[in-house]
Amino acid sequence: MSLATVTPLGPLQKHADHATPLVRDAWYVAGLSREFSRALLPRTLLGARVVLYRKQDGSIVALHDRCRHRSFPLSKGKLEGDKVVCGYHGMVYNAEGRCEHVPALPNTPGNIRVDSYPVVEKAPLVWIWMGDRAKADPAAIPDTSWLSDPEWATVGDCFPIRTNYVAMHENLLDQTHFSFLHAGAVGTPEWATAPMDVTERDDGVYLRRELKNSPAPGIYAEPMKLGDRPVDRLSDAGYVGPGLHVAHATISVPEPENGERAAFRVNIAHVITPETQSTIHYWWFNSRDFALDDADISALFHAASSSAYMEDVEALAWISDIVESEPPGYREMSFRSDRPGLLMRQSLQRRADAEMEKRRA
Ligand code: FES
Ligand SMILES: [Fe+2]
């Protein structure tokens, strides 16, 4: 796969923002494997109410959570075998969303159905496709295989955030905020000025930064027991698609002493699913290739990651409050260092435009 070097932004490029229609033709995470059971689970995804449950064979079903009769939430009904029975007047829907029984009628019309959505489980994640069904290709689900690989130890959590997914992705592609918003955890003053190599491929935007001979940030120094000794730091991070940002970090010890580990790797998966136009479901996973069974280091990583990400949660909610309450048309300034986020916003805009065009056709 060839990598295209980014060219300067043209003045007429359109950039997705908080008001751009959500991209629907994409795989998003509906939730974690452990959340789904034989209970009916309601969840709002891309502005639609969805009810999810496991069939008797363990596979997961996702249906529009709204009865076609009087809009009763199907999630407030009950499961009978693999079928959902509406709790208001007893209509029965099968796992494909087709109504098989209307108790008030002698015969059931064959054309009543609620929307159903393709679901693919790749534990610990459950992916859903809410766009054009014909385009739902499971092979396009992004790789997160290390999350279930025993060679990696993973901690993670889920934070709902009051922000649009565009702002969240831009935050993740913007590493120049590390040294300020996260001064205590992932930022060091040197990191803010480290050179950045930006590439685009397959609708994604990727950046690579390298910093040599500099102390590790707090989030790594403590669990890796590095103290303040200088290390080499390499970060590959990228917007993989509307539902996922992945960062790979390698911390190398230039001159390891007797038996000391020479390199530590950390993968971070930021899983983003729009709940509505202005809120997101956000799951993060911090995976490491060292100290796999060390519960204290897991706790340390969880606490440090949580406090760093909560700084983003808070900042994004503050920004969202301003953006959504003031009149539209305000022109934010952008700098060269904002290029990764702007490229991502162009990509989202192109995809949103193409979907709107298709819907109009
Ligand atoms: S609202 Fe569901 S059967 Fe009437
Ligand atoms: Fe951040």
Image (cartoon, helix red, strand yellow):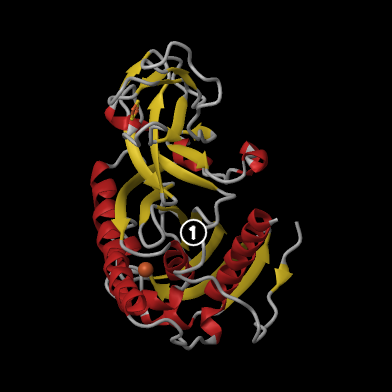
Choose between 222 and 195: the one closer to the eye. 195
Q: Answer with the quarter of the image where residue 345 lies.
A: bottom right
Occupied quadrant, residue 304: bottom left
Left or right for 266, reference 359: left
Residue 182 location (% of width, % of height): 31, 72
Image point 34% across, 69% down: which residue? 217
- Is 138 placed above or below 318 here? above
Q: Residue at x 43, y 41 (%)?
A: 30
Disc 1 crowd rating (10 Å Cα; few below 14, some 14-19, many 20+) is many
Q: Decide if residue 96 is in sight here.
A: yes
Mark 1 = which residue? 247
> At which x and y percent is residue 222?
28, 60
Quarter of the image that includes the C terminus: bottom right
Image coordinates of residue 342 in percent, x first then y, are 56, 75
Q: Is residue 265 above or below residue 221?
A: above
Name the foreground residue: 109 vs 176. Answer: 109
Label 1: state its secondary structure: strand
